[in-house]
Amino acid sequence: MSCLDIAGLRVCFATPEGLVRAVDGVDLTVGDNEILGLVGETGCGKTVLGLSIMRLLPRNATMEGEIHYNGLSLFDLDEEAMRNIRGKEIAMMLQNPSTSLNPVMRIQDQVTESVLAHNKVRKREAKARSLEFLRFVGIPADRVRDYPHEFSGGMRQRAALAMAMACGPSLVIADEPTKMLDGPRKVQILALIQRMQQESKASVLFITHDLLAAFTVCHRIAVMYAGEIVELATPGELSQHPLHPYAQGLLESVPRRGLKPIAGASPSLVDLPSGCRFHPRCPVALPACHSSHPVMCEAVAGHFVRCLRHGPSGSS
Amino acid sequence: MNIASKSAQYLVAFSVVLALNFFLPRFMPGDPLAYITADPSADMPVVMSEEARQELENYYGLDRPLVEQFGEYVHNLVRGDLGWSIYFNAPVSDVLMGHLKWTLLLVGTSAAIYVALGVALGVISAWKRNSKTDTTLLVSILSLGSWPPFFLAMLLIILFSAKLGILPMSGAETPWANHSGVLARPLDIGRHLVLPATALVLTHLAGVYLLTRNSVLGVLGENYILAARAKGISERDVMLRHVLRNALLPIVTMVALTLGFLVMGAIFVETVFAYPGMARLLYDATVIRDYPLIQGSLLVLTVLVVAANFGADMLYSRLDPRVRRQ
Amino acid sequence: MRQLLQLLVRQPLSLVGVSILALFGLVAILAPYVAPFDPWERGTPMLPPSGSHLLGTNDIGQDLFSELLYGARTSLFIAFFASVASTAIGVSLGLLSGYYSRLGFVAMRVVDVFLLVPRFPLIILIATLLTPSVWNLILIFVIFGWPRTTRIIRSEVLSQRNREYVDGVHMLGARDPYIIRRYVFPQVLPLALVQLVLEASHVILAESGLSFLGLGDPAAKSWGAMLHYAFEYPSIFISDVWVRWMLPPGACITLAVLALVFLGHAWEEWANPRLKQWAPARM
């Protein structure tokens, strides 16, 4: 029984332009004491995936499938039970902490609030605990009573991490924790997340579009494209033997390897291509790719890929 | 915008009003003293001897250059001399003082009620957006706000005073009443206050209601509300600590914005109810063309609204931590 | 544009608003042909409602129903011209001051002063001083109406200006007037329409208010003026005259303002889409 088990997840949004299939058949497992990276370009559905685990999607969304947290089926819980899970068992660091922090509340109070929401302790105790977490992420005691606008981007991201950790969750969903940060601060937050994970033994779902960041901290990486997982492997395997053409493209687009962009544009989630979703942009597409939709299969031990070149197809 | 520039802005606004107040009548066609002499072109000619007219002209300094007149005007203002009311035959400042308290009572009571009510209903509406509650509230409050205050006032009089006879028709209190006991007078004043205040509250509810509703809706869509929910905080706490604290902050300045409309409403309501307030005084003075009184009441009304706005701005900058720590 | 027309008829609030306005507009245009009497013509005073005088006559014998019909002309005429003019000025000034920052700075200081000072007392003062006429009233409303629209349009322009596509087009060599006309203006248009409608509602209330106070154009028939004379009639509150003299013009003012307010609100939701409220998603 693993920490998080996602099976057959489908998330659709009803919009005036049509039905948006943000997540279309995702199977994913996050093991205990593991950092799983979820890598993909903007708009591929990664954030929606994160929000659906938390059941925080807007009213026009429909979810199908199953998500099990330590064997508990999340979709079967009522709202009150789910609320008890949020923050306490599964915590989420939202994208862009410049907007995800309450502008009129002091940073310390926002962390204390997390503690008090799930623990029956006195306010003083909760405050002390929040100071601990803030100190852990490197925010000095003389800054904790500041307001978010007085913090730098890096500090805000760290404060968000402290808030996520405050109740000792077993699963932390980190949505683009390095997005707004530059080089040194990126490294800093990555190191913090790693340290946090090692000390708390929590599992982390590390959502990012930055492949290199994922390589640095993740134990396994899942590559997502157009609402599906297309490849799953360890960082070592993925960087040396990427199997899916999209993953290969991603690697070659990194500055160190030449900044080669992937041709074409990501598909509209309303009007998806037939067969393999990547085939319009794929440099090595086969004729069958146009009509057959490939399924995930294990090409090498522990290395999964969804590509007709490496495995059978599903429906045609 | 910091405090210094805001203060400067208010100062400019005040000076503009002062200047307009002074210069406008003098630039308009017609002799300002025409109506108080036996000039047939006037609405209400007051017969006056030539010496008296000369004295008035000297008093107003109409024969001196404009700039000098303005200087004199400002100088007098600073000393608290607002001129001499022709109709009341008394200093303008005295007349105003007698009327100001009633306007303050009426406007103050109404504002307190419609702000509290408007905020409460706006929050409820935003919270239950697009539900039946929201739609009903929205349609009814918007409809109420479309009523001209004077029309509503007249209808209230007909219903409650004429037909039902439970509330007085006009005035601020029963004239020449002999009140026994300490509570009798306030009660009497209160009875006279009900209908005018109701008229003002009902017609001005829409403003604050919409502003609140929009503010709360705006905040509900913010990322930090999603983040608060992700923390597993109860809905009640999300509402109180995150939504309301942010959404209601601008209410302070928003309410100040509605004060201008409130003054307008007060002019109508006071007129219909013959309520002896200053807004109505402005109108009455206009009818009689009592220029010093017009200018005096205009000035005081405007200054009050501007001052209230200024106060609200200052209060807001104290409350919003983003502005406070600059 | 298509969106707007769709919205016009689909949204219930908008539909109500448009219908009422259309009705009033029709009445306003057709008044001279439909009105049974010339509303300025004096006859027997205080006649009760009858076949020929649907609402009876007022205290100087003028037919109330005809007054009512002609009142629509005055109120709508003034509201239309005043709001169109002040919105036009507001949009032009807003576009220019959003684009050219120095002009913008000066303009905003002026707007700030205008918006700070309560306009109605000043309106009364000016109305007293000018000769009362329809065009003077329009002038007054335009003078006090343009600042609000200017500020709103300007802030929208400022936010549009920083969008990437504007930079892109600019880099391709497009010059300012072209950019303003082709890219910024269409974005600003929905907001401008909303302001137009809302301003019209303010004007109707203000105009009827001024007429009620006796500061309107004595030559023009207006709903507010009807209420003015009704109010001055000594036994207006005690007798039942108010039903036919007070109710109709008051109701008309209310309905006209209501129509505009509904319309403005419905369009505002369209021009300023707010994010959907969170709620637990369906399983």
Image (tube, grey):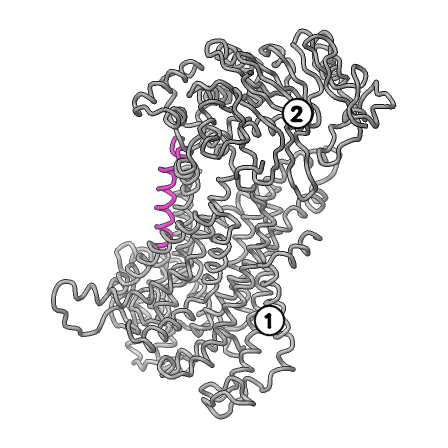
Overall secondary structure of the magenta section: helix
Q: Real-space Cα distance between discs 2 and 1?
A: 59 Å
Q: Is residue A226 left or right of residue B280?
A: right
Specify the quadrant that holds the N terminus of chain A: top right
Residue at image location 56% in from the left, 68% down from the top: C78
- Residue A291 visible at all: yes
| Residue B307 inside the magenta-drawn segment | yes
Mark 2 belongs to which amino acid? Answer: Val
Q: Magenta segment, which residues?
A: B304-326
Residue C166 vs residue A140: left or right?
A: right
Q: Which residue is mark 2?
A: A26
Return the residue at label 1.
Answer: C24
- Disc 2: CA contacts within 10 A as few (<14), some (14-19) or many (>=20): many
In the image, residue B296 above or below residue C172:
below
Kind of element beneath mark 1: helix
Relative to residue B125, is residue A256 drawn left or right? right
**Picture quadrant of residue B245:** top left
Residue B55 visible from this viewpoint = no
Residue C122: image quadrant is bottom left
Q: Are marks 2 and 1 in contact (CB under 8 Å)?
A: no
Report helix, strand or loop for mark 2.
Answer: strand
Which is more foreground, mark 2 or mark 1? 2
